[in-house]
Amino acid sequence: MSLDAAAVARIARLARIRLTDDEKTNLAAELSQVMAWVDELQSVDTEGVEPMTSVVGAKLKTRPDEVTLNVTRDDVLANAPEATAGFFTVPKVVE
Amino acid sequence: MSLTHLTIAESVDKLTKGEITSAELTEAHVRAIEDARALNAFIVETPELAMDQARAVDARRGKGERGVLEGVPLAIKDLFCTKGVQTTAGSKILEGFIPHYESTVTANLWRDGAVMLGKVNLDEFAMGSSNMTSAFGPVESPWRRHGDNRPLVPGGSSGGSAAAVAARLAPGATGTDTGGSIRQPAAFCGIVGIKPTYGRCSRWGTIAFASSLDQAGAFARTVEDSAIMLGSMAGYDKQDSTSIDLPVPDYRAATRRSVKGLRIGIPKEYRVDNMPSEIDKLWRDGEQWFRDAGAEIVEISLPHTKYALATYYIVAPAECSSNLARYDGVRYGLRVPGKDLTEQYEATRAQGFGAEVKRRILIGTYLLSAGYFDAYYIKAQKVRALIAKDFSDAFRSCDLILTPTAPSAAFALGEKSDDPIAMYLNDVFTVPASLAGLPGISVPAGLDSGGLPLGLQLIGKPFDEETVFAGAAALEKAAAFTAMPQIMAA
């Protein structure tokens, strides 16, 4: 599996990471190398094998659907780069 | 003996008897940390907090029950959220982040009377095997090769934890292990590192990298100390749905168990090509030490071992790309403005993440994108099931598995950093147990020809950390590792 700079640009867009043209070229080579390496798994016979979803086979516990957080709105906003009037703020999304 | 050279067990003993105070013990470590800043082991030092905690411990002496770590100062990997103390995961994107809550693992340590010296450095978001990827600069190992003063890596990702404990800046430290991030740095720095079974320690409040693999553990200079620490850190937590509701056994007592009659498995697939002869010899020494202690050596087969690294480098980046989507410049951490929200995301993540983190997010995003998910991620989870089955089959004929911890001793800062796959190979012996969720420990067992530490790894059955500790204590006794790093607190 080989990736070119255009493919890297598409992935970077999905991942919301801006890349320079040089980074795209370098990452195309690096990602192609890693993908070629992980491609060796295609040769493993996994017919009839269930994908692993839990390392210890434990059943997830359930709990009552109750609010348990004991933090305040101000606690949550304290680390925000920008907060106004008790809300997170972002650039205008809706015209 | 100098206070910074005491083990945790010795410190607890002296504190209990009133021979030393926690304030004295803590202050000695605070000074040692100041003197060793060249190692860059700490991102944040918390001397005032440490001294306050220590004095509080001293003030309640004789009043009520003492915690198992009462008055013992520890270093905390900067991946554990600590209330009111900056927590960065070694990344610029979280610089200045002050959690308003405490991770369960650190809360357990404070419950048991431990004192926090500060937050130690790590590879960015725990992604690395050298500590070179930290946004706060690399950590130097306190060790040097004979006749060579070049700085060496402490291993990674918990490199600051391992360097701090080896350099006697702390008697113990927390770590996290996703593919070897406790065991490999422990081996590189000549100390003990235990990663318990997945689910033994709560992941709540630990910054996530790959959630199906991440597991907290402990660094210390003796097996007994690592057992004391893990006993405090472990336990069921309703805030982590993958933590397991089982009682935590007395790990410290387990270190005194005999290994007589235990069957020690030697996986033939781990005799990799190009293994340095010194490591091969150390491994055979380990077999002999177990025979001498009355254990039986049995050859086992883990046939899917050769696929473990490739499996890991699908599962871990896929989970990383998903977990790290939360760093959006809105709720916490760095924000780089853009003309619209998408541009702001892209600029924030471009500036906030380092090269290795970007590489893994991009690989993961690609692997999880439409058309590739089944071919890569589901395929990898199927191979992972086969790797886990290899171990459960092998454990029918053995009780523990003995391997080298890493394929080499520590390398110099900057070596291997231009080839991601060469770097990933550091974890060849630790990744399989991580994929299977099994407990593993690295015990310092010898030196290479350059005078650098080498470790042996023991892998145990799920939730059988007790046998792991018993085996590790036997290895420790037989190896009689007493070498000390060149850079060390007095």
Image (cartoon, coloured by chain):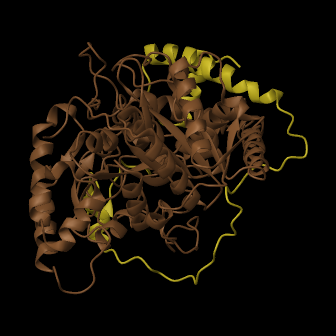
Chain colours: A yellow, B brown
Which quarter shows the C terminus of chain B? top left
Q: Nearer the viewer, residue B344 or A66?
A: A66
Q: Is residue B284 visible?
A: yes
Apparent side of residue B3 relative to residue B244 in the rendered image (left or right): left
Residue nearer the viewer, A21 or B388: B388
Q: Is residue A62 left or right of residue B347?
A: right
Q: Is residue B115 above or below residue B381?
A: below
Rendered view: B119 above or below A65: above
Q: Write down the quadrant of residue B369 in the picture.
A: top right
Total count of labels: 0
User: Image quadrant of residue B336?
Assistant: top left
Q: Is residue B317 visible?
A: no
Instruction: Give the side of residue B312 with respect to residue B27, left or right.
Output: right
Instruction: In this rendered view, identify the residue nearer to me: B191 or B115.
Output: B191
Residue B211, horizontal then vertical, whole percent: 55, 52
Depicted A77 relative to depicted B348: above or below? below
Q: What percent of the width, then of the height, locates residue B442?
A: 48, 42
Q: Position of residue B134 (x, y in %)?
A: 33, 34
- Residue situated furthest right in the rendering: A48
Image coordinates for residue B4, horizontal then vertical, percent: 17, 49
